[in-house]
Image (cartoon, helix red, strand yellow):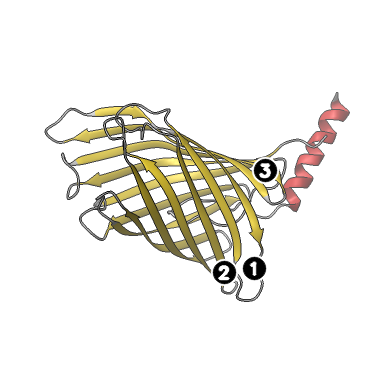
Amino acid sequence: MRKIALALGCAWLAATANADSISTDRPGQSNSPSVVAPGTIQLEGGFTFQRETDGGDPNTNTFTVPGALLRVGLLSFLEARVLADGFVYEERSGDNNRSSGSDLTLGSRARLFDQKGIRPATALDFNLSLPTGSDAVTSDGVDPGGTIIFAWDLNERFTALANLGLASTSLGKDDSRRAFQVAPTYSLIASITERAGIFVEYYATFSDEGIADEHAMDGGFTWLVSDDLQLDLSAGAGLNRAAPDFYVSVGAAWRFFLPSR
């Protein structure tokens, strides 16, 4: 048993030593085209506070935890994904507060190309949101969506990301319509040191069915505690009345490796 344990430990250490530093979808709205390696599991999540007054009726403070993302490496170019906001608590001025559980989203990511010259690294996400949440937050429908992801390493310190998300979203229990949404994001990431990074980002959502378009910006910091653990802090603000006033988020991402046989 000791020999077996030692062999498993050595295999795990070897995998860790040979792996690159963790690459995450936190923080911010833009995703990177990276996929986790086969035999790897990555957990990402955190706490988010959001304030909405201009577009909200009533004015609302929203607390969300853990905002979880589970990533499981399947093949060298493919990962499985499970996403959920989790517990959502709303403080609503002049109205009853609400607590609820969110919908669950199943998805995958396929890395299509590495960067070559001006051609960006490219990946494709596919998601399917399931109506598992409470009445207050569920879309009450099975909602497909996808995102095409581009990334350019500009030099050793700077990376640019661009995402284009498309979704068909149900509008809730009392509305049989669907909204078609287009969600572009543009992000610039800079490495301050080998462990610290910053980013700034613009993102928007364009919808039909009379839903107002939203425009916002955010930015934040990341700190690489180890090759397998990253902490982050971010904040953002709406650029028009339809977008939430602001948000603040703190979170972490942790990667670990399944023992080799």
Mark 3 residue type = Gly
Mark closer to the chain start, 3 or 1: 3
Q: Is residue 242 left or right of residue 155?
A: left
Quadrant (top left, top right, bottom left, bottom right) of the C terminus: top right
Cα separation, mark 3 vs mark 1, equals: 21 Å
Q: Nearer the viewer, residue 87 or 241?
A: 241
Counting other residues with Cα less than 10 Å from the Cα at mark 1, is it few (<14), some (14-19), or many (20 or more)?
few
Name the residue at 61% across, 64% down.
121
Name the residue at 11% across, 33% down.
94
Q: Give the SS element for disc 3.
A: strand
Q: Is residue 5 above or below residue 110?
A: above
CB within 8 Å, label 2 to label 1 = yes
The residue positioned farthest toward the front in the image shown: 176
Mark 2 residue type = Trp
Quick check: can you spot residue 112?
yes
Counting other residues with Cα less than 10 Å from the Cα at mark 3, is it few (<14), some (14-19), or many (20 or more)?
many
Q: Is residue 114 above or below residue 77?
A: below
> Mark on residue 115?
1
Q: Which residue is mark 3?
A: 73
Q: Which residue is mark 2?
A: 152
Mark closer to the chain start, 2 or 1: 1
Name the residue at 50% across, 44% down.
252
Quadrant (top left, top right, bottom left, bottom right) of the N terminus: top right
Mark 1 residue type = Gln
CB within 8 Å, label 2 to label 3 = no
